[in-house]
Amino acid sequence: MKVSYRWLKESVATDLSPKAVADRLTNAGIEVAAAAPLVSGLSGVVVGEVEAIDKHGVCRVATADRHFTVVCGAPNVAVGVRAAFAPPGAALPGGQQVQTTRKRGVLSEGMLCSEKELGIGDDADGILLLAADAPLGSDLVTSLGLDDWILEVEVTPNRPDCLSVVGVAREIAALTGAPFRFPAIAVKEGDADIVALAAVEVEDPDLCPRYAARLITGLTVAPSPPWLAQRLRAVGLRPINNLVDVTNYVLWELGHPLHAFDSDTLAQRKVIVRRARPGERLTTLDGQERELAESMLLITDPERAIALAGVMGGANTEVTAETTSVLLESAYFNPASIRRTSKRLGLATEAAYRFERGADIEGLREALDRAAQLMADLGGGTVAKGVLDVYPSPRPHPRIPLRLERIQRVIGICPPREEVVRILQGLGFAVDEAKEPPDIVVPSFRRDVSMEDDLAEEVIRVWGYERIPSTLPGGSLALVRRPAALRRAARVTQALAAAGLSEVITYGFVDPERLRLLGWDPASPELMTLRNPLSQERSILRPSLVPGLLEVVATNRHRQIPDVRCFEVGRVFRSGGPDGLAREEARVGIALTGLRASRAWYAGRDTVDLHDAKGAAEHVLASLGVEEYGVRASASSFLEAGRSGELVVGGEAVGWFGELALGPQEGYDLAGPVFLAELSLDRLGALPPRRVRYRALPRFPAVQRDVAFVMPQALAVEEVESEIRQRGGALLKSVTLFDVYAGKGVESGMRSVAWSLTFQADDRTLTDEEVNALHAAIIEAVTKRFGIAVRGMTPEGG
Amino acid sequence: MADKRASEILKGARGEAARAKSSADLEQVRVKYLGRQGILTQFLRSLSSIPVAERPEVGREANLAKAEIETLLGERLAELKAAERRHALESQRVDLTLPGRRPSPGTLHPLTLVQDEIIEIFLGLGFAVAEGPEVESDFYNFEALNIPRDHPARDMQDTFYLSEDVLLRTHTSPMQIRIMKAMRPPLRYIFPGRVYRRDIADASHSPVFHQVEGLAVDRNISMGDLKGTLELFAREMFGPRTTTRFRPSFFPFTEPSAEVDVRCFLCGGEGCRVCKQSGWLEILGSGMVHPQVLRNVGYDPEEVTGWAFGMGVERIAMLKYGIDDIRLFFENDLRFLTQFA
């Protein structure tokens, strides 16, 4: 909310500069986001009078003691007008220095300026005309009252009282000790009694605990006087006419929303406050016809709805240029009800904003009187005698005992008692010191204060948070470390980063079309769909990390980064969790595409393949201590058939790896194949923990033998290897597959696979004869079982 | 007359060793003199044929010559090897400016780096760590935290809903409730995690971001302890000369509440674009746990007090690294990600 410094000073006599006031407020919790002069960059502009104009539009302009020749083509320039004049040397907003220039062959000494050129309004159609009695030669900024500062106040939802000049002024007074003055309000009432002229009935006091109204008659609608128009403009409001402007003025000054009905349009001049009826409709001031729900509170007359209570008036009873009498409403509406109505209709207004935060149920009378008198003054009307005020159950003021020990305990320090009393009184609280501890009486405009700790905050924020001592909590020692799930995630993250992959973090919202592309049914009840997504493309909670990783690959590809090796650790979501929440599962996802290693003079030009994805998955398993796992072929909706496998530990699938199918690859517009893997960190975490046990180092030498078999492509190496291990028995210490070859010299459909076998005994040195016999036995077993041949045997070492 | 043969052999060997041009040449010299059929070996073998009286003298000289030849061959070999090594290195000159063969590790995301640092600091202060669900109930996310339906405070956090009562948590604060319900004081916890707000992404807003929440509840714990703890955190995170400011604010689940600002690093408090001319940068929100929240979890606010704080990891990372657009964290452009390792 914008607050004018000059306006503030009418209610608080402070000597502090606008900046100092802003700082003080901010430090007390009323955040001032910006404090800036109302006009900036404007200097040297004065009040001038146009004394003469020749037929070429050359004017003679007089200031207090000089005459200037000025070329001006504005439509509203005329002899005798006083206007904003910028002589040579004056500065205009935007850094423009006014100079003597040649225009239409004449030396023009300065310029007559429009509102827009002066940076004080939007009107660029003519020069800014001033009052006929504006003192010649006087500074324009001062004479228009534009030497002001505007504070941009950001009020937290608990402090609706500070959505007003008076509320902010009260804070400043309490913070600085400067005297606070509430505006003097007195109503000159006419003879006619309102009771005879109008009536108010509240049918639903639960939603409208108080409704007050005054009647002002004999009004003439006209533009507001300059002081009022200027004041509204300064805080960003557009002046409309004297009656409407008064309600806005009082809204800004006292913070209470008012509504003016043209009372001649009210049936029987009677207002009834009630809930909407089924099917009822109302065209609001903005011209929209609105369908109303039965929960919404309306202002009506005996025949129809005339306003959406606390939100917006109706077009049918609007103040117009012909209005002569006004029924002025000042009411208190139930905050939650106003909020529901405003949200439901998507109608956010200044009035609703304040009512939903809580208006001042007592202050509404002052606002009513203030506005009624101003309308009568500015519109030449009369305020009828009396007020229609329906307030069946006056709200009591809460009384809260305040213990200074409580302040001390919660805050760690407490100001002296007289200071506490002074602060609270300055904020408008009454202090009953007859009680021990003293009772604090909460004023009606502070609905946010309802308990002792609220008062503690009031005291300490005014006294100064900077005075709170900085201490550290004591207490007993407790063992703290990261929980297992976080340690697991950290270990995997570190391992993959060390292995050359980049960690990514994605939004986690998925596009149903992309899911369909990947073979999911976006309508599956397993998926969790947002009711109010920002867009369709981000409407489903990810069931897998894959869609996000593919987006990363695609983003980088479009930015000419074709080689991506990345991973993400995060949660995926399925419906059906505890208490109606999600089944959340921590996973790690991996995506690899392009070159295996960054380009360098020593690096190969190999691109990644399926085995890189499998290797990365194995690396994850190893980082969590899982060495024993199996692979089984798996079918997946988004991986190439025959190029994907499931990783199985202890009979349970813990993840998968594979090559992205061509469909999604093209759908994501990816240049080349992408290899993926995903593992469940939660499932891996549920495995029995690995116990690391030391194994004695071998004491006898090892013997190594290599063997290569020419085998069909279709025969899995794992089958052959397990046969080798089985036949090799305890003396075969390790089996390493070190070469796979297909091509020249090997029959088509076949490949040569070579293993290196290491033989070793724990209790003796093996003889060549023993090793040769065992090696031969292994070869025989394998060749017989699979019907394959040995390609070559190269005895080595020994 | 003395037998001169030993000294002649020695002389010959010395000359040939000196003339050897390579270690291979020298090996031939060694074989010629000291090999099985070598000159000196044969001379030693022939000693039995010379007169007994001369034998000790000649034998001594022969053995001396052998030792000397071995020594000079060894020295010459070292010389030749050094020369050969030198020659080899010279002929295979290395360009020292050629880039080194570097291992190519990947990178950790800047948010991970910053979140780890935050966790590390609070672990050091004795805070335990816990995580909670990202899909939360309205009760834990709002109601139990004193944010009823139809309350304007809900405007502070625009929310993604999955159903009437299920939502994506808008802050990590629901973990305050979950932990307080599950445990008894004293408690000292931090809760890192992802949170979601229904904000359209721009330079300073993101529908997804990360928070670290803190909570301490004990018999006698005050706002002074909160202030001291967070000042210590700020100095650890941003450097020992960091100035902090506690400023009153409003959160429905704390009373009193405070925002914590640090003096703008960029302008030192003079006011600049980054701090929006204020001289201060907001880093987190905090406050004393609201007595009603304590009652909601079955604690007696007369018996225990507590405080809580919550900070945005992105915010801290942006300040720490000078990042001016929050969207960069989620775009995952590799040229961005590789800047922080």
Image (spheres, rainbow, N blue to C red):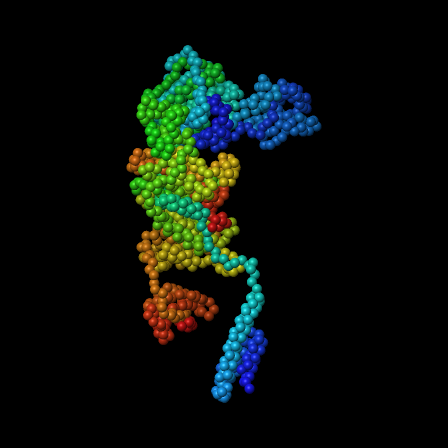
Name the residue at 32% across, 39% down.
B218
Count the numbered circles shown: 0
On the image, the x and y values in percent for residue A652 come to: 32, 55
Left or right: residue A466 compared with residue B294? right
Task: State whether residue A278 appears in this view.
Answer: no
Taking the view exactly as shown, the residue that stands out farthest to the top is A191
Closer-to-camera residue (B77/A509):
B77
On the image, the x and y values in percent for residue A659 come to: 43, 56
Taking the view exactly as shown, the residue that stands out farthest to the right is A105
On the image, the x and y values in percent for residue A395 come to: 33, 23
Closer-to-camera residue (B191/A515):
B191
Closer-to-camera residue (A691/B126):
B126
Name the residue at 40% across, 22% down.
A364
Name the residue at 40% across, 72% down.
A798
Name the residue at 43% across, 37% down.
B260
On the image, the x and y values in percent for residue A520 come to: 39, 49
Left or right: residue A601 compared with residue A346? right
User: On screen, B293 above or below A517?
Assistant: above
Task: State whether residue B212 appears in this view.
Answer: yes
Closer-to-camera residue (B188/A416):
A416
Q: Quadrant of residue A784?
A: bottom left
User: On screen, A362 above or below A535?
Assistant: above
Quarter of the N terminus of chain B within the rendering: bottom right
